[in-house]
Image (tube, helix red, strand yellow):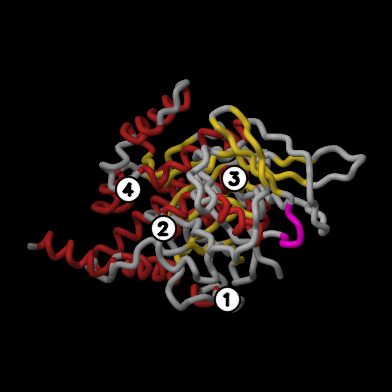
Amino acid sequence: MNRSVWVPSSIVLLAGLGTVFVGTTDRLTPTVPSEAVKTAEFVPPEREARVEVSYRRDGDDPFSDVAVATVEPFDGDGDDALEMIPANSLLPAQAVPKAARSLQRLAAAGDAKAKALKIAEADGDASADRQPAVIDTPPEPARSAWQSAYFADNPLVGQVFGADGTPSSQDALLGAAHGARYVLLGEIHDNPDHHLIQSDIIGGLAKLGAKPSVVFEMIPQGFADILAGFEAGDIKDLATLAERLEWSERGWPDFSLYRPIFDSAVANDLPIRAGNLDRETVRAIAEDGVTALKDADVRRWGLDDQMPAAQSAELAETIREAHCGLMPDGAIAPMTLVQRARDGALAEAMIGAAGETGSAVLIAGSGHVRNDWAVPVILAEREPQSRAVSVQMVEVAEGEGQPADYGLTPAAPAPFDFTIFTPRQNVSDRCAELRAQMGASID
């Protein structure tokens, strides 16, 4: 079975021959005849459609910036077929050094039988002479498209799998997400690639015609008025929004990691909604349990029903492991209750957001998007007729290159509909760091 590799589209990539991929739903594969074509009339692309690169020949001084375009050969009676290079909607096109070698690499990645390529040298706004690229040396390895530094060569990286480890694809994921009222995208908070993929999925849904509200675990419900003001304003200043949301002060990873998601929402005119509980509510639950809440809140957050014993024990163990076994046993039960309350609040926010636009996407840690005890369970109880799709993003580990290594097996499927594997952001011993922090705080 063929498997497609997920590459974050917010990073400008040249893939195939002269094609810039700018979205996960863009499956651009130029059709090129097998016979070589010696000449073709070149029609320069519009300036805004060009990708500016730095180009030089061995022994020559650098030329000025040039524009790269591809030309498909055409029959004598046919019309010219010109493929424009699209601009990326989130980031400007990156300068590609040594374009001749880059083009050699690109040609080798596509159909090596025949490629009709012209390079137009430009000086300022003027087009100059054109010359064909010479492809006569072995391709150089492509630079990694991933921002996370570790284990990008793991064979699982970029692959999409179903819950039981069956190979899937980004198209299958987007198709399922497009048919769902609720899409839940689970992340590791400090992994930038996870946020790029989340941005891709949101942009892909918008391209398919959906207009989901985007609900953030990272934004407490007390900031709803700030989001409403941002939505009503004409100027979408995300830096100012981050300041008003007190993003850094509340301890989340740098806003720049999450910005691609906000950019995608703004670019597609999608509402941004708060999902999490306010800090005061969390503190009250941790200290006084459900007695700190109104009866209506207890019911709507699903805290009036006893969690099945097996699931409660598994959730408690998950929380214990997440804190490296350093939390006292007496703290686990309150933390479990807080987790359940947050799940309930996120589910309620999703329901309200979908009521506005017809669908909603949740941006949250993977623990909140599990199908066995988290937000999807509450959504199913509240709206059994509505479909939800949950996605987890998983960092690969060294030497573990099979889905089963990460708990995706037919015998024991993962509690997520889809899993996307990415490189690892950090290989430091997080538990050792946490022990040091707790020791320092005790001292």
Q: Which residue is mark 1?
A: 409
Rendering coords of residue 442 (x, y %): 10, 62
Which of disc 2 and disc 4 is earlier in sequence?
2
Residue 238 colored in magenta in the image: no
Which of disc 3 and disc 4 is earlier in sequence?
3
Q: In the rendering, which numbered label is found on residue 22?
A: 3
Q: Secondary structure at mark 2?
A: loop
- The three-letter amino acid code for the residue at tag 3 is Val
In front here: 136 or 218? 136
Q: In the rendering, which numbered label is found on residue 252?
A: 4
Q: Are marks 2 and 1 in contact (CB under 8 Å)?
A: no
Q: Is residue 190 left or right of residue 32?
A: left
Q: In the rendering, which numbered label is found on residue 170?
A: none
Determine if residue 285 is in view: yes
Q: Are marks 2 and 3 in contact (CB under 8 Å)?
A: no
Q: Which residue is mark 2?
A: 188
Q: Which residue is pictured at 28% across the width and 47% down the height?
A: 251
Rendering coords of residue 172 (x, y %): 67, 57
Q: Quadrant of the C terminus?
A: bottom left
- The three-letter amino acid code for the residue at tag 1 is Thr
Determine if residue 350 is in view: no
Which of disc 1 and disc 3 is earlier in sequence?
3
User: How far apart are the alpha carbons under marks 3 and 1?
Assistant: 33 Å
Label 2 or label 1, whichever lies nearer to me, is 2
In front here: 144 or 414? 144
Label 4 or label 3, whichever lies nearer to me, is 3
User: How far apart are the alpha carbons under marks 2 and 1?
Assistant: 22 Å
Rendering coords of residue 235 (x, y %): 44, 23
Which of disc 3 and disc 2 is earlier in sequence?
3
How many C-alpha atoms fall within 10 Å of the one at disc 3: few (<14), some, or many (≥20)?
A: many
Label 4 or label 1, whichever lies nearer to me, is 4
